[in-house]
Amino acid sequence: MCLRNSCAAVALFSTIAVIGSPVFAQAAPQAAADTEAVESEIIVTGSFIRGTREDAAMPVDVFTADDLNKQGVSSPLEFIKQLPSVGATLGDSNQYSTASQGFQGNGSLNLRGLGPTRTLVLFNGRRTVLAPGDGFIDTNLIPIFALQNIEVLKDGAAATYGSDAIAGVANFVTRRNFNGVIIQGDLDAIKGSKDNWTGSILVGKTFGKVNLMAGFGWQHRSALPNYAREFSRTPYAVNPSGWSALSTPGLFAASYLNNGAIQTQTARDGGNAGCAAVGGVNDGTLCRFSFIPWNNIIEEEDRYQGYLQADVDLTDRTKVHLEFTYAQTDLNSLGYSPSFPPTQGPRGSGSANAFTVSPNNPGVPAFLAQSGLAPSTAERPLAAVTAVFWRPFGWLGNPADPNRGAGVGQANNKSYRASGGIEHEFSDSFRGQLYGTWWRSERRTSVPDMIGSRLQDALNGFGGPNCNRALGVAGQNGCQWFNPFLNAAQPISIQGLTNPNFVPGASNTPELVNWVHVRNGTFQVEEQTVVDLIFSGETGIDLGGGPIAYAFGAQYRGNGWSSRPINAESDLNVNPCFREGDRGCVGTPIEGVGPFIFLGGTRFERQTQNVKAIFAEVKIPITTTLEVTGAARFEDYGGSVGSTFNPKGTVRWSPTDWLVLRGSAGTTFRGPQANQVARNQITSLAGIQAAANNFKSVDIFGNPNDLGPETAFTYNVGAVVSTGGLTVSVDYWSFDFNDRITTTPAQAIATSVASGAVAANGTRFANCSSVFANLITFQGGACNQGVTTGFDISRVRTDWVNGPGIKTSGIDVAVDYNVDVFGGKLNVGGQGSFVLDYTFEDFVFRGVLVQSGYQAKGFTNYFRDPLTISPFRGNAWINYNISGINARYQVRYVAGVTDDRCVGLTNCTATSFGPVNFGREVSSFTQHDFHLQYDLPPIAGVKTQLQFSVENFTDADPPASRLEPSYDPFIGNALGRVFRFGARVQF
């Protein structure tokens, strides 16, 4: 394994990226930028019939390696994010969205904004590695340095490929018969980070009838803190989303014993001056806390990829193809809040009054003095201190991370994939292939959180791994005190502030911090074995347009998924109750709350799934200008899921040489994932509107009883015009879903329960008789009518169900023009996708309307499916190539949206400082890029290409939105202006 800079210095990479000038499936191919002798075999996506036309009845976009190289992008993520037909995409860090949590390091492809689990991603036409248990292909694992082209089918394809191909298919195809060496490397210079590096090497050689190809790639992304961008430093009064009521300094209650009577006073730790000094905002009795200084836009990440491929011509009619892929992604310093806020403590649920502090805690005297409270005396002794609104560390940062003070998490992915098969031509008109594919995907994730009972013990002087509690002496015999007050430390954060209330010697030791703040996480593994048997050929029947062609075959998919806690603390079989080691809650409603103050635990779970399918396809050229294709697939999941049959038909008509009319219609489906039918739960985090947008735990439970497949009816109608060097395509597409696999809406459930009159704290009183009340865990573990409010919500339970349907439709437009100008090649083009409709039906759960149907197009949808749906996404480019120089300008545009949370309201929300309308309208975003490549004259057969790019050269900020980082990551680019320097050496 090589060092960061030496890897990249092998040769600065000439990128491999995207969008631009895609060779639409119907467009004439552009001239190659290099002249390497690579014999490429295009795999037709969307059909198993050989020779399907590129301007066929289905809308397929083809992007060659040369197209990608001209864009200056070096990863599948950058390619995907620029596709106009793609919605919200995983890849960059966005830990605040429940759709993104736990996926750091993963990439996804989300065609039509229908969700990444509804887009099937293939590698060389075969299924490839999923993120374990999550149902989507991790596109970051694809070795982009070995690719020859990428094909994107923007139409339902379950009749051909089976489950997951509801929205479409992306096929990443590697080079074939490659001979030579390509070394690539690049550097992305990003303000505020230590830059991103990429390096790769690809080697190919033919030995008689055997061609071998091998490659290795490495990518490094440096951390880019949110605080490095001015637009993320939004004051609380402007955007309260990234702020919390629970903090250090916190609000404490000091109870004194005065002549036998208890007298209690509340005070903010350190007073007004103490809060402001460390970065907080004084808000009544609270010191508002922002976790943004400890979070990142990009997490530090290293990715390693290896690829081996062999093609063997056994005879003129028999070929063997073998391939192996290894990928590893390491994120070892994920930036989280220094500590999460408590939603429960050792005594039960609730954020308020969750912990008490012993009056003998060494931090108490300074706390009393700095907070304007009287000292404890013999005449008026301090009897108790209660943390009313408080979180550990807060503005002081986490001392376990001396560099940034963050709560440091980890995510480590590994995957292995092997695929191989034999292809044989029985005759000129009949052929077959048998392939087997196996892959294994591993993901270990961990996030630190406080164990409530350990924290309470430490507040009372019985903390630390070596504490001899049996001797009963606080602060002695290996026992340590946890200091919860402002006087415990100087702040550790990117802000560089000074705490005037710090008392030397009052700090918590790293040993104690690591004992109370423990990693919570899972190790997930998924394996899949796929066997494909496919026959295809041509009949002797010719109706005038050529022989009728056909394909048929069978597929077997065997999946195994398992998830286990990474330690005993995370294991609900060991620690199911509020207190570590306690099992007294087993069999009661609170079983499974776990010992952590915020995050939930998990249990070991294993699920298997076996899917069998048969399919057939026929293409009938009725005339030389009219062609009809039909396909059908039967797929059996067994068990409660059952089976499904899905047909599809397409038609292509070319009334003139320059016009092609095309259409397709069919049904498509997706079966439940293994983890969705597991008897287990995972915990995500969400700012719950009914709880004043405070972050709460959302527990997502599997449904092993009645979760069935979802289905959709899809159709596409379009036209392609080709004349001279101009190609124009227009397609209308439509998807109509039924029995959509989704989770019950946590926000709507919480709002439905907390639906009474407005309480003094600004939230609403709970309706304790609501049919959904048992899905909410409240402060103290009970709902008391007329007392309990939305502010008392601690946790929300959601379940996987077959939910309401969706109807979405739109229009795709593409233009591509090629012409010779001044001795060079000029290419001008553009692509755009208009969303015309994205309607959700009413969500009825337990016989009650929990969420009314809504139009998602043009709205942010932050707290509901399907996240941001822009009404238009598009890009355009001008490319000129002459004498070894290629210059390219491209522009990407994403239309703005409205925050649906503000619809019908005079003000979106309010704080004690006044109304808030920040991000009411999320503006459009336009990015301008310039790319330049220069091919040096060959020297001794060595070709060298130098590359330079400026991306977002206007340095446009992403549009403001009322999210925690204060921008919409699904519309804008938060990186700012990026300079890219690259080189490619080939021989």
Image (cartoon, rainbow, N blue to C red):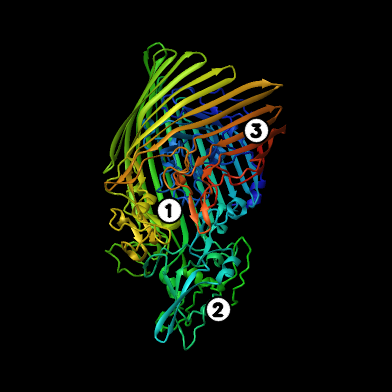
User: How much space separates mark 1 and mark 3, taking CA atoms?
Assistant: 43 Å
User: Which amino acid type corresponds to the residue marked 2 in the rendered image?
Assistant: Ala
Query: Which residue is disc 1 drawn over?
Result: 689
- The residue shown at (54%, 66%) is 400
- Determine which of the numbered discs, if any, sits on residue 889 in the image: 3
Q: Looking at the image, tell me whether mark 2 or mark 3 is earlier in sequence order.
A: 2
- The residue shown at (62%, 48%) is 196
User: Which amino acid type corresponds to the residue marked 3 in the rendered image?
Assistant: Tyr
| Residue reaching furthest to the top | 544
Q: Tell me if mark 3 has few (under 14), some (14-19) or many (20+) residues whose alpha carbon lies within 10 angstroms of its own.
A: many
- Side of 709 relative to 829 (left or right): left
Query: Which residue is disc 2 drawn over?
Result: 369
Q: Quadrant of residue 761?
A: bottom left
User: Which amino acid type corresponds to the residue marked 1 in the rendered image?
Assistant: Gln
Q: 383 and 644: which one is in front?
A: 383
Secondary structure beneath disc 1? helix
Q: Where residue 155 sits in the image (x, y, percent)?
A: 43, 30
Q: Nearer the viewer, mark 1 or mark 3?
A: 1
